[in-house]
Amino acid sequence: MTSVHKLSLLSLAVLATLMAVPADAQESYYYGGFGIGQGRARIDDARISEALLERGFTTNSIAREERSSAYKIFGGYQVNRYLGVELGYFKLGTFGFTADASPAGTLNGGFRVKGFNLGVVGTLPITEKFSALGRVGIQRATTLGTLTPTGSVTVSDTRPSQREANAKVGLGLQYEFNPSVLGRVEAETFRVSDAMGNHTQVAMYTVGLVFPFGRSPAPARRAAAAPAYEPPAFVAQAPMVITETAPPPVAVVALEPATPLVAFAPPQSRRVSYAAESFFAFDRAELQPAGKSALDVFASQLEGSSYDNIRVQGHADRIGGATYNQTLSLARADAVKAYLVSLGRFDAARITTEGRSESEPVTLPDDCKGPMSTPVIACLQPDRRVEIEVSGTR
C-alpha cells in the first residue's frame, strides 16, 4: 500500500471518528492562517524514458529535482469543536528533471504547481491543548511546464500547461497557544498533472499558524465540591494470642551433576546468483513469472533449514548514472524480498536488502569497450544480477 493510500485512509478514519462524536456547545468562529514548508514530487522516470523512446531516443540517465519550497494561505469556518470548512490557496513548488539521451542530446523539463482547494477539516481533541487533524477535499491545480531540448532531442511544445481538479487529503496536529493563536504541523498530498501528459503525487509538509477571530472563550469548568471528611467509627479489637511453634526440619536435596554444554556448529552461509534478465524486464523492477518460479524453487530448497538472516543484493551495470542505478538495484532487491515474504515461509524481519548499484561488477573494465550499443549491453549482462545469501545452520 502506498503512502498516499495510507494517508487517505487515515484521514477518512479521523473524519469518521469525528462524525460519531456529538458537537458541544462551544460557539463557532471564523479563522485565517498560513503554512510554509516543503513540497515533494514523484517524477516518473519510466514515463519519461517511454516518451523519449517513442521519438527514437534511448535514455541513458535521469537526474531529478523532486523537492521545493512550498506554502499555503487559507481561511475557514469552524462549525463546532470537531468540524470545519476551509478554503485556501497553495503553491507546491517547482520540480524538474534532466534526461540524458542517445543519440546525443538532453531534455530538461520542469513544472510548477499552484491552485485553490476546498475541503472539510476534522479536529479530534487529544488533550486540552493538543488535537489531531484530518482533512478531505478537492483542489483545482494549474501546472505550468517547461521543456528545453538540446542536441538531437526535439519537442513540439516547449511550454505545456494544464488545469484540472483532483482530490486532496491530509493529516496533522494542532496546538492551542491561546484562544487567539493556534499552531499546526500538517502533511497533505495532491494528485496533479505534470503538464506533459502524466499524473503524479505531490506531498506538502508545512508548519503554520491559525488566527481565530470572533471566538468566545470556552466556559471554565466548575470544580466539584470535595466531600466532607467523616472519620471511621472506632471498633474494638479482640486481644491477639501469640503462640510459638517449632521450625520445620530442613530438607536436604541431592543435586544432580550439571549437564555438559552442547557445542553448536558454526553458522553456514549459502549464496546464489540470478541474472537480472531472468527476473525482470530491462530497466524495470517488477518480478516476471520466470523470476517468481525461480524464487519458488529457492524457497522449496530452504524448507527444513534453520537460518538467521537472508540478505538480498541488487546489482546493476555501468550503463546510466550512479544514482539511478542505485535506485534500480535497491528496488529489485526489495521486489525479491516482497515476493519471498508473500510466500508465507519467511520472516520479513530476517530479510535485509541492499542496492549495490554498479560498485561490484563481474566484468572487467576492458571486457566491454566501445560506445553504448546492443553488443555492449549484452556484454555487461553478468553485472545485472540479484544475489541471495542465506546465513544460518542446517
Image (cartoon, rainbow, N blue to C red):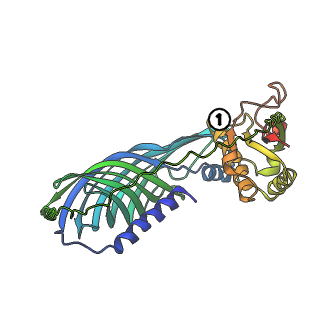
Q: Amino acid at mark 1?
A: Gly
Residue 16 sits above or below residue 146 on the image: below
Name which quarter of the figure residue 327 lies in: top right
In the rendered image, is residue 57 in sight?
A: no
Mark 1 falls on what kind of element? loop
Residue 232 picture location, percent across and down: 21, 63
Quadrant assignment for the C terminus: top right
Query: In the displayed image of the protein, which residue is found farthest to the top?
Result: 366
Quadrant assignment for the N terminus: bottom right
Residue picked out by circle 1: 321
Q: Is residue 109 left or right of residue 232?
A: right
Front residue of this view, candidates 88 and 214 = 214
Front residue of this view, candidates 255 and 67 = 255
Residue at 34% x, 63% y is 117
Residue 301 picture location, percent across and down: 87, 51
Residue 287 picture location, percent across and down: 74, 55
Name which quarter of the figure residue 392 lies in: top right
Residue at 48% x, 65% y is 9
Front residue of this view, candidates 214 and 94 = 214
Q: Is residue 271 left or right of residue 159?
A: right
Badge 1: how crowded within 10 Å, few (<14), some, or many (20+)?
some
Residue 154 picture location, percent across and down: 59, 46
Residue 287 sits above or below residue 321 on the image: below
Q: Is residue 303 left or right of residue 100?
A: right
Residue at 42% x, 46% y is 94
In the rendered image, is residue 53 in sight?
A: yes
